[in-house]
Image (cartoon, rainbow, N blue to C red):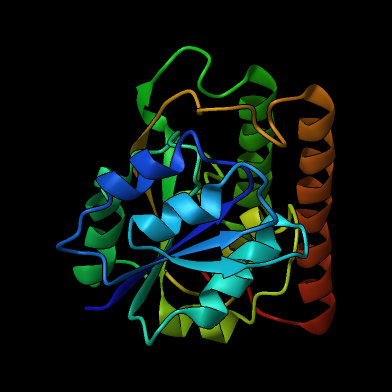
């Protein structure tokens, strides 16, 4: 099975080396680091450690993920992982197992179900994620607890979903479209630690509120859009 790992980065020189070093080399086929104009040497460090570095000058987390997905070399499964070392790359098999066992098409790493490190996930970020998860459960019938960035999916499923969100919406678009299309989405508990460096979004209350509002409104818009078009909701 070919496994491609996509890692969006922006000034992650302090952490990218640890992230790449901890990826299981016996499982991962290729690593694509999608860098958005870092000024701290992140691309050079990633390249030195064997990653394939893609330069994406257009800002946006979703944009970086889409760029990496488009450049992946014939993968069977694509894994998305942040470059700040808050998730542990050596737990990648936890995400892959439900897919390789034929129990899931998409897996989501829940930061709330395995190991809780004080301060790893700011209270406002945890609250926003829980609120989004509750809304998804009510409107889409999908029971999840978190919208964590550590996730995996079959490549053919990702192609069918036609993902387009360029910014905050990336965190939830794959979940909403996957649920509406009837794909099997399984949540897996993963560890979560304080990130290295300051977060560009959850590091500030303003950034978190902005992201939360965008995500929550997207959840509602997708729901009513598909009700109007008559798309059946999977059981």
In which image quadrant can residue 140 be found?
bottom right
The answer to whether residue 142 of the structure is visible from this angle is no
The image shows residue 18 at horizontal and vertical percentages of: 35, 39
From this viewpoint, which residue is outermost toward the top? Answer: 118
Q: Is residue 168 left or right of residue 90?
A: right
The image shows residue 221 at horizontal and vertical percentages of: 84, 62
- Location of the N terminus by quadrant is bottom left
Q: Is residue 196 left or right of residue 101?
A: right
Q: Quick one: 184 or 2, which is closer to the camera?
A: 2
Residue drawn where x is 41% and y is 46% of the image: 109
Residue drawn where x is 19% and y is 64% of the image: 27
The answer to whether residue 225 of the structure is visible from this angle is yes
Q: Quick one: 109 or 43, which is closer to the camera?
A: 43
Q: Is residue 225 left or right of residue 51?
A: right
Counting every numbered tag in the picture gives: 0
Residue drawn where x is 25% and y is 50% of the image: 94
Residue drawn where x is 66% and y is 28% of the image: 125
**On screen, 97 above or below 1?**
above
The image shows residue 166 at horizontal and vertical percentages of: 75, 64
Q: Quick one: 174 or 185, which is closer to the camera?
A: 174
From this viewpoint, which residue is outermost toward the left? Answer: 26
**On screen, 11 above or below 79?**
above
């Amino acid at each position: 099975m070919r496994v491609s790992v996509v890692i969006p980065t922006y000034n992650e020189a302090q952490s990218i080396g640890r992230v790449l070093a901890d990826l299981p080399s016996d499982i991962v086929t290729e690593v694509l680091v999608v860098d958005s104009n870092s000024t701290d040497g992140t691309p050079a460090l990633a390249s030195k450690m064997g990653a394939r570095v893609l330069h994406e000058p257009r800002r946006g987390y979703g944009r970086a993920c889409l760029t990496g997905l488009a450049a992946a070399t014939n993968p069977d499964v694509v894994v998305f992982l942040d470059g700040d070392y808050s998730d542990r790359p050596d737990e990648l098999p936890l995400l892959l197992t439900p897919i390789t066992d034929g129990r899931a098409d998409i897996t989501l790493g829940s930061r709330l179900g395995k190991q809780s490190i004080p301060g790893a996930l700011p209270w406002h970020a945890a609250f926003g994620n829980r609120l989004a998860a509750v809304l998804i459960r009510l409107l889409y019938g999908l029971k999840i607890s978190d919208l964590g960035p550590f996730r995996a999916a079959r490549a053919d499923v990702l192609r069918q979903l036609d993902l387009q969100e360029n910014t905050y919406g990336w965190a939830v678009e794959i979940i909403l479209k996957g649920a509406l299309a009837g794909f099997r989405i399984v949540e897996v508990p993963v560890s979560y630690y304080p990130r290295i460096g300051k977060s560009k979004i959850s590091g500030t209350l303003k950034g978190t509120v902005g992201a939360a509002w965008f995500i929550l409104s997207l959840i509602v818009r997708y729901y009513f859009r598909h009700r109007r078009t008559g798309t059946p909701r999977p059981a």
